[in-house]
Image (cartoon, grey):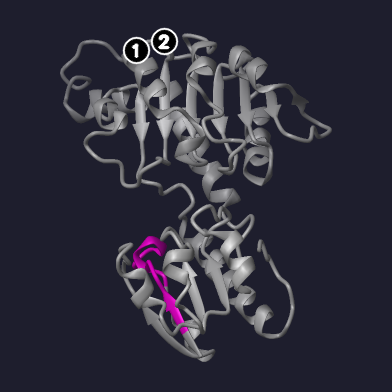
Amino acid sequence: MKIVVLDRLTLGEDLDLSAAEQFGTLICYDNTTPEEVETHIADAEVVFVNKVKLHENNLKNATNLKVICEAATGYDNIDLDYCRKAGVAVCNVPGYSVYSVSQVTVSMVLSLVNHLPEYTGYTADGTYSNGQTANILTPIYHELYGKTWGIVGYGGIGSRVGEIAKALGCRVLAYKRKPVEGVECVDIDTLVAESDIITVHIPLSDETRNLISKERIAKMKKTAIVVNSARGAVADEEALCQAIEEERIAGLGTDVYSVEPFKTDSPFYRVRNRKNVCLTPHMAWGAKEARERCYREMLLNMQAFFKGEKRNRVD
């Protein structure tokens, strides 16, 4: 059996993939360009993929292909309609990054709320040591206690962020398609209008694309901080960056982008150096433990398929 990993570097250079070798021949490509996909998967029976887009045009000649194992919870990079038609199984890995993403999300919020880059800058550049006072208290920062934290998408990651927000003393609002007990569920327009902190944790779909729209961004408080650790395209990226430039929101944190990596023509490139902006290179999912957990689950998904079992199937 031939197992092909299409974008090995997206899983981290430190991650040991050798466990797959007990099941067959393992071929790893650091990266795969769109033009290389068809060649790389030509005689593969199993494909491990993270970000590479797989669709009818590059799958149709992969006649040996039996199962695609997605190294993520989201699978919008895979053409499920074609896979169903072609009889190719598709498996994802739900829940593996809950602790990692929630940790980074809250870290972004705390950094933006507390202005940590500015304050650590005072000690790093000597301003504090050369000063005459025991403390520096500008820029002004505020407690999260008593503030409203709005969570868009209240699944595994969103609910974990909600627990942390409650522990910090926040009122938590949630936007969820099916309301749940134990949290105040509201519509998306109420959430964006009432929240001091807004964090986004929804998968990308036709329904959620551009959910954080220009019109909804206009409804936000001028003091609001927005953090997106879900998918770039769930938000109007240009509108978010314009809101920062025009000081219509107080802070922006983003780990995900509609084009990755974002290029110099991206609106994020314009705001990347602003003190009230925290941009990270799609790393929130990737704590070492989360990546190891994800890979173990991918191997189990593959094993289950060849045993005739259905495990984490999304096709």
- The disc at residue 139 is 1
Decide which of 159, 4 is in the foreground and name it: 4
Whether residue 89 is visible to the viewer of this picture, yes or no, is no
Could you say which is closer to the camera, residue 199 or residue 82? Answer: 82
Residue 58 location (% of width, % of height): 42, 68
Type of amino acid under label 2: Arg
Q: What residue is shown at x 31% (from left), y 70% (from top)?
A: 36
The magenta-colored residue range is 3-15
**Residue 300 picture location, percent across and down:** 63, 76
Disc 1 secondary structure class:
loop
- Mark 2–mark 1 CB contact (< 8 Å): no
Left or right: residue 163 compared with residue 278: right
The picture places residue 38, in percent across and down from the top left corner, at 37, 73
Residue under label 2, please give it: 248
3D distance between C-alphas at marks 2 and 1: 18 Å
Residue name at image x 19 percent, y 22 percent: 129
Q: Relative to residue 148, is residue 201 depicted above or below?
A: below
240 versus 202 height, above or below: above
For mark 2, give the secondary structure. Answer: loop
Query: Any magenta on residue 52?
Result: no
> Which three-letter amino acid code belongs to the residue tagged 1?
Pro
The residue shown at (68%, 37%) is 154
Q: Earlier in the sequence, mark 2 or mark 1?
A: 1
Indicate whether residue 13 is drawn in magenta: yes
Q: Where is residue 218 shown, x and y percent of the image?
A: 49, 12
| Residue 195 in view (yes/no) | yes
Crowding around mark 2 (Cα neighbors within 10 Å: few <14, some 14 to 19, many 20+) is some
Which quadrant is home to the C terminus?
bottom right
